[in-house]
Amino acid sequence: MIESPEAPSRPTAAESVPVDRSRQGVWSAVGAYLSWGLFPVYWKTLHQIPALELICHRILWSCLTLYILVAIRGMGREIARAIVKPRIVAVYVIASILIGINWLVFVWGVNSGYVIETSLGYFINPLLSVLLGVVFLRENLRRWQWVSVLLAACAVLYLTLVYGSVPKIALTLAFTFGLYGMVKKLAPLGSISGLTIETSLLIVPALTYLFWQAHIGHAAFMHLGSSSVVLLLASGLVTTFPLLLFAAAAQRIPLAQIGVLQYIAPTLQFILGATVFHETFTPAQAGGFVLVWISLALFGIEGAVFHKRKGSSQVVRGNS
């Protein structure tokens, strides 16, 4: 049936839900990546604490923050039902291992003066996210999207040659977070419940290490100034907030779109490393980063043109 001009068709509730979910997913991803982009500033203020101890505190306070959220929202039963199912627990065991490694490597890299290389890891990660989406989740790429991905791959290879060795920090961050994103895409629970299980799986080894450090007299927590103690305690909220946003985004928008939006975080990290922290950045390295940014621009422009054409064709069909 053809709608008359006087009675334009209106989207039904069922049609508007995917649009709303997509919009929420995009804003959730943007919020997460803005937060992660500014993370080096936060962790640099705690550089006097060894990275492993810092991560254990991060796990501890994140876990307590999530327990409070679960109690407030009455989600205890949902988690209790989930943790008796081996298949669900297995998913979150993998997720917890991946995010634990990612946290440790990132904090160590930032506090050891490798902010620019950590940003490279998160420039590489969108490429990996796109490929994982294609290979494992059967997400499709169009011709110019493939060109963008290949250009980014060439940029990564070039940067590897410029560095003179394999950028281990960058690649570890890229692979752990890329795989984490895919696991979260397949995760069966909501963001809060899932993150609560992940951090709970990490809390036992974290507490064991912290108690051991205290026992041998090496714990930094009780020997810090009040400002550092407050920052450590706040690490739970600082860690949990962007992860919740990311988990929400992963369940609402395609993995390829998440990969593109992730360029927000490494761009901010790169700017901080080059300007605020004054890390070495050569013209040769700049060439590789420019190639990455061109691939991002190509991916974004292609997507905008595709959706514009798709919208135009739908209007034409609707008026025919």
Image (spheres, rainbow, N blue to C red):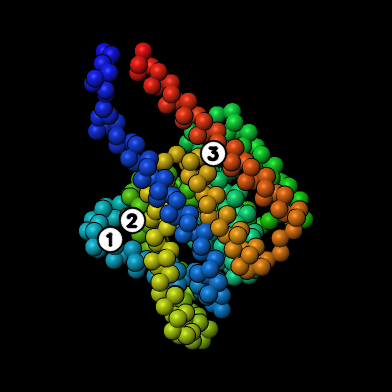
Question: What amino acid is found at the position of numbered circle 1 in the picture?
Answer: Val
Q: Position of residue 79 (x, y in %)?
A: 29, 55
Residue at image mark 1: 70
**In the image, what residue occupies the spot 45% across and 81% down?**
227
Would residue 201 be found to the left or right of residue 272 on screen? left
Residue at image mark 2: 192
- Crowding at dot 3, Cα within 10 Å, few <14 / some 14-19 / many 20+, comes out as some
Q: Quadrant of residue 166?
A: bottom right
**In the image, what residue occupies the spot 46% across and 59% down?**
35
| Residue mark closest to the camera, 3 vs 2 | 3
- Crowding at dot 1, Cα within 10 Å, few <14 / some 14-19 / many 20+, comes out as some
Question: What amino acid is found at the position of numbered circle 2 in the picture?
Answer: Ile
Q: Position of residue 231 (x, y in %)?
A: 44, 75
Total residue callouts? 3
Q: CA distance from mark 3 to mark 2?
A: 30 Å
Whether residue 175 is visible:
no
What secondary structure is found at the residue carrying circle 3? helix
Q: Are marks 2 and 1 in contact (CB under 8 Å)?
A: yes
Q: Position of residue 143 (x, y in %)?
A: 59, 28
- Crowding at dot 2, Cα within 10 Å, few <14 / some 14-19 / many 20+, comes out as many
Q: CA distance from mark 1 to mark 3?
A: 37 Å
Residue at image mark 3: 300
Closer-to-camera residue (223/188): 223
What secondary structure is found at the residue carrying circle 1? helix
**In the image, what residue occupies the spot 50% across and 34% down?**
304
Question: What amino acid is found at the position of numbered circle 3 in the picture?
Answer: Gly
